Amino acid sequence: MSRIIMHVDMNSYFASVEQQANPFLRGRPIGVTGKAQVAETGKASRGIVVAASIEAKQQGIKTAMSTWEAKHLCPSLLFVQGDPEKYAEITHRFNVLFHEFTDFVEMFSVDESFLDVTEEAKDFFGAIIMAQMIKQRLKEECGERITCSIGIGVNKLMAKLASDHMKPDGLVVVKPSEECAFLDQCVLSDVCGIGYHRKEQLQNLGIFTFKRLREYPLDRLIQEFKSVGYWLHEAAYGRGDNQVIPYESEPKSIGHSYTLSKDTTDKEVMKHTLLGLADKVAWRLRRDGYQAKLVRVYIRFGDFSGFGKEKRFEQPLTDGLALFKNAWPLIKHLTHNPVRLLGISVGALMKGPEQPSLFKKERKVSSVLCALDHLQTRYGSNSWTRASLLGVHFQARSSGFHFDQE
């Protein structure tokens, strides 16, 4: 029996997430950039467009286009600095959603995943119904601006090719025995794995279409491309890998590190930074259903030397303040030297929620954290902060914040 593979590809992903987060950006051409000065001043400089909104693409703006060229092409283009943490949060949300439909989910990149729905959908008609349900649930869980294109086929190659065929918000199905006819509507470079140089090599052999590629002798393809020659031959018939491999590896640690905007000996700055990082680590612990019995802290100085230490505790923790209180004493005696980077991670992870405490004060803290977690799940990880951290802001790119770094 043929497998039924679904490829879900988010549309203009980074830009769509920004538009969902900021109503002012909706319906306007925007370009996500990695340079803070471009986003703040709105002036083009030596940078590139990391992602373009649907409105910007309609004006001819493309990914990797220079900001100068993009602004010249579309004077009304707004630049927004990229926010990796925000995108990672939405990626986590939609992959959790996909697992409600099937256990076989393979994350292909930050904005696309493969799903094997053979058992759940039963047939291609069932897969179409499931795809429509996924589209609706995405809007409910992530927002109206978060749309996707879905391709359905018998393997990963055809599913991805199908999802690329209709954007944005498309749904394309390539049923068994329709692969060659569908490929003949495409150009060689539409297939993932045939880039500019490989396409040029094929054209030098007189191969400009998939029909011609099917006709070309297999032995000559192997002679020219080695092992890739066999893959090209199979791809020309729409044959490919149909195994979706779910990522089930349990994490050994969860951590964050942060490079300060400038070296400092200010203990208050260091304490606030470490507490903010501890809260982020603790949120991920609770979000993913873990507890930690070990905390590690790392400090890097201005001369790039460093020091790290860890501490184990009897009772597992999921609270950022508790993690901070265990971590800070390990390094506070070293803070007389200019500090460049701070990092905190947890290990000795245990699956399962935190056990209710016997003490009333600790039960109240757990209750508050539960309510705050609901806020973060709905509105993102920046939806609340401690009063002591109101002046602390982690810059995602310009000062080196690393998300999910372990």
Image (cartoon, grey):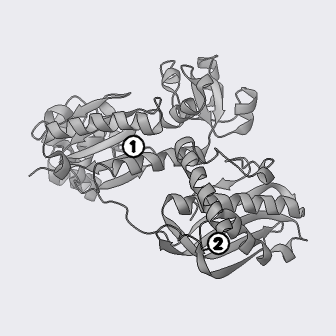
Tell me, yes or no, if residue 58 can be seen here.
yes
**What is the three-letter code of the residue carrying label 1?**
His
Q: Secondary structure at mark 1?
A: helix
Which residue does the image show at 44% across and 39% down from the upper left?
141
Q: Measuring 15% from the left and 43% from the top, which residue is drawn there? A: 237
Q: Position of residue 48 (x, y in %)?
A: 61, 35
Residue under label 1:
197
Q: Is residue 376 above or below residue 354?
A: above
Residue 342, how many percent across, how many down? 74, 65
Asked if labels 2 and 1 touch by Cβ distance under 8 angstroms, the answer is: no
Q: Secondary structure at mark 2?
A: loop
Q: Residue at x 37, y 37 (%)?
A: 137
Q: Nearer the viewer, residue 281 or 57?
A: 281
Q: Compared to 189, does 60 lie above or below?
A: above
Left or right, 277 with reference to 110: right
Circle 2: residue type: Phe
Q: What is the CA distance from the residue labelled 1 to the residue labelled 2?
A: 66 Å
Q: Give neighbour class at mark 1: few <14, some 14-19, many 20+ (Cα, 10 Å).
A: few
The answer to whether residue 197 is above or below residue 386 is above
368 or 341: which is nearer to us? Answer: 368
- Image quadrant in which you'd find residue 18: top right
Q: Which residue is mark 2?
A: 359
- Residue 142 image label: none
Instruction: Name the quadrant of the C terminus.
Output: bottom right
Q: 46 or 324, which is in the foreground?
A: 324
Side of 318 relative to 259 (left or right) = left
Q: Is residue 7 left or right of residue 406?
A: left
Residue 281 shown left or right of residue 109 in the figure:
right
- Which one is in front in this view, the residue at disc 1 or the one at disc 2? 2
**Residue 68: where, in percent of width, then height?**
66, 26
Quadrant assignment, res 369: bottom right
Counting residues from the start of the chain, the first of labels 1 and 2 encountered is: 1
